[in-house]
Image (cartoon, coloured by chain):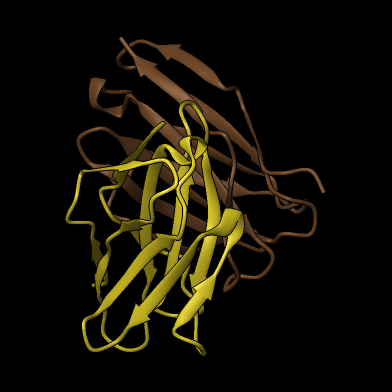
Chain colours: A brown, B yellow
Amino acid sequence: KAGVTQTPRYLIKTRGQQVTLSCSPISGHRSVSWYQQTPGQGLQFLFEYFSETQRNKGNFPGRFSGRQFSNSRSEMNVSTLELGDSALYLCASSSRGADTQYFGPGTRLTVL
Amino acid sequence: AQSVAQPEDQVNVAEGNPLTVKCTYSVSGNPYLFWYVQYPNRGLQFLLKYITGDNLVKGSYGFEAEFNKSQTSFHLKKPSALVSDSALYFCAVRASYNNNDMRFGAGTRLTVKP
């Protein structure tokens, strides 16, 4: 099976803009989770979607949002970008909510 | 809330020697523990997990981990290190089986020298 794919792989934006990142899970996986990785804060959980519903949410401001489509693909949106949003954004999928999460290669977002 | 600690930022070992990367956890209830590895400019690769059962868990690439409930530890081990094992290793914990809110440690950089 193909792994988790994320697009784009690299992105450069300026402060105040908004951005949308995309994640396609492993075929058959219905749960998609998003994580932010930065040198200072490490890996932090953003949110999880399962069957198009947000099931869990981390401690991030409302500028961070997401959604999941009927084919389990997920998008994450960040509005009003700040310099501190520069990070590697990782998506992970699992077959059922409780199974092992498999990660994509990530999207490297740079905010100037 | 659940958490994990990786007390060592860096671990250096010689090729062929055994390696240990340490992890301790804190969670109310039963822990669900994971090890992932990250290579430069890559996502995280799953190595192994402990859900229940035997305290010694075997995973990918010859890695294994020992779950110790009394010491709340889940150390990653490999009997003979390879230079290609050099990478960033993360321990993670979930508070419940149905909750994918996974908390990661800060990571341990493993360097294996020839």
Location of residue B55 with respect to B65 vertically, above or below: below
Residue at left offset 79%, top offset 52% = A27
Q: Is residue B74 left or right of residue B85?
A: left
Tell me where residue A62 sits by quadrant. Answer: top left
Q: Is residue A38 left or right of residue B44?
A: left
Residue B83 in the image, given as x and y percentages of width and height: 47, 35
Residue at left offset 72%, top offset 44% = A3
Q: Is residue A29 left or right of residue B111?
A: right
User: Residue A73 or B43: which is nearer the viewer?
Assistant: B43
Q: Where's the N terminus of chain B, which quadrant?
A: bottom left
Q: Where's the C terminus of chain B, which quadrant?
A: top left
Location of residue B99 with respect to B23 vertically, above or below: below
Asked whether residue A21 is in view, the answer is yes
Q: Is residue A96 left or right of residue B54?
A: right
Say how many tags the image has.
0
Residue A87 in the image, given as x and y percentages of width and height: 35, 28
User: Residue B13 or B63: which is nearer the viewer?
Assistant: B13
Residue at left offset 45%, top offset 35% = A89
Tell me where residue B79 sits by quadrant. Answer: bottom left
Residue A79 in the image, given as x and y percentages of width and height: 38, 29
Residue at left offset 51%, top offset 28% = A107
Asked whether residue A18 is in view, the answer is no
Location of residue B109 with respect to B60 vertically, above or below: above
User: Residue B104 or A95: which is nearer the viewer?
Assistant: B104
Residue B107 in the image, given as x and y percentages of width and height: 30, 47
User: Residue B81 or A2: which is nearer the viewer?
Assistant: B81
